[in-house]
Image (cartoon, rainbow, N blue to C red):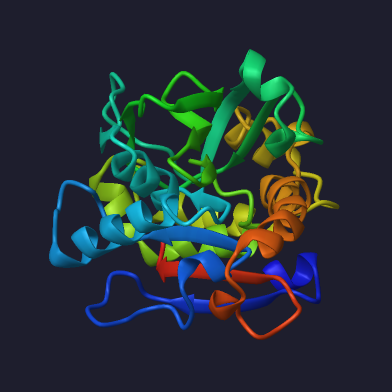
């Protein structure tokens, strides 16, 4: 995905949850750190989760710009002193496969992370946990009636931007997630039965920039504001253009050259372990 945004980006993907698995270079040497989605949940405080939290805290001390998607937002929230737990809604459900009625806050409307987003929009989302208490140094930039959807956290040295929704996802991926978690989603009440899963997955598979729903699909998915959808990873593009790249030159001048990765292209360290339900 990052390569599709900028062909000169070099990435190192590693599992922060795995014991003994470390990035190739000190975190100060990277241009950006991206936390992806995960099957992890903060309530299951496993050794792997503790290692991820330790990594996130170290990242906040590195001075390297950070970005988090879904679990990445939750992980950074807890690492910075906030709280995450099951989404606090009347129906007890999270969001799948869409987050509806996301609204940029006053801060979000002028925040570079959301450049080219409308003030209100829908997006792909797959989660049952959410931010319950903000870190003291956080600014919410987007939310809806269910949870915090995006925010900035200013750490001791690093700035973190993160989203609860999935700007990087596409219809095919959303369809695959929905089919893959069929039984879990039915048991959790997101869908009534396998037929509903099948219909949703087929719709998601076709969903894209040129897609126009049929009349029956317009009825079935009437709550989806398709005209607000942006099928590009807007927030990640903005993170690269407005935080990572501008900071790169400044940081390269101040970071000890012995710490630098011996390449000229943009490095992004990525912590990855699937997607959260």
Side of 58 where 244 appears, left or right: right
Residue 69: % across, % down: 50, 50
> Is residue 177 or residue 17 the one in the foreground?
17
Q: Quadrant of residue 79?
A: top left
Residue 15: % across, % down: 37, 75
Q: Is residue 273 above or below residue 132?
A: below
Question: Which residue is situated farthest in the top direction here?
Answer: 106
Side of 155 where 217 appears, left or right: right
Does any portion of residue 19 appear in the rendered image? yes
Q: In which quarter of the image is residue 103?
A: top right
- Determine the residue positioned at 80% across, 51% down: 211
- Determine the residue positioned at 23% across, 48% down: 42
> Is residue 97 or residue 48 the one in the foreground?
48
Does any portion of residue 207 appear in the rendered image? no
Side of 158 where 181 appears, left or right: left
- Determine the residue positioned at 52% across, 65% down: 28
Residue 261: % across, % down: 61, 80
Side of 13 where 21 appears, left or right: left
Number of callouts in the render?
Answer: 0
> Is residue 183 or residue 89 the one in the foreground?
89
Q: In this view, does 181 lie above or below 105?
A: below
In the picture, the quarter occupied by the N terminus is bottom right
Q: Is residue 55 above or below residue 41?
A: below
Residue 267: % across, % down: 64, 72
- Determine the residue positioned at 74% across, 46% down: 238
């Amino acid at each position: 995905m990052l390569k599709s945004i900028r062909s000169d980006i070099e990435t190192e993907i590693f599992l922060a949850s795995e014991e003994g698995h470390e990035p190739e270079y000190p975190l100060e040497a990277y241009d950006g750190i991206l936390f992806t989605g995960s099957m992890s949940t903060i309530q299951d405080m496993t050794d792997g989760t503790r290692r991820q939290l330790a990594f996130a805290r170290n990242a906040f001390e590195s001075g390297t710009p950070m970005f988090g998607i879904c679990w990445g937002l939750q992980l950074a929230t807890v690492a910075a002193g906030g709280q995450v737990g099951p989404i606090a809604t009347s129906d007890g459900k999270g969001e799948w496969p869409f987050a509806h009625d996301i609204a940029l806050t006053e801060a979000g409307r002028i925040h570079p992370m959301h450049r080219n987003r409308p003030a209100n929009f829908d997006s792909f989302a797959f989660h049952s946990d959410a931010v319950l208490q903000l870190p003291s140094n956080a600014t919410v930039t987007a939310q809806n009636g269910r949870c915090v959807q995006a925010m900035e956290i200013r750490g001791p040295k690093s700035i973190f931007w993160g989203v609860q929704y999935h700007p990087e996802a596409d219809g095919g991926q959303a369809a695959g997630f929905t089919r893959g978690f069929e039984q879990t989603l039915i048991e959790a009440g997101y869908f009534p039965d396998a037929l509903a899963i099948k219909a949703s997955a087929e719709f998601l598979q076709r969903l894209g920039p040129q897609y126009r729903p049929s009349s029956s699909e317009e009825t079935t998915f009437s709550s989806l504001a398709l005209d607000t959808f942006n099928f590009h990873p807007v927030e990640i593009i903005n993170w690269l253009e407005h935080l990572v790249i501008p900071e790169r030159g400044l940081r390269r001048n101040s970071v000890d050259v012995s710490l630098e990765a011996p390449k000229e292209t943009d490095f992004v360290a990525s912590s990855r372990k699937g997607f959260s339900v």
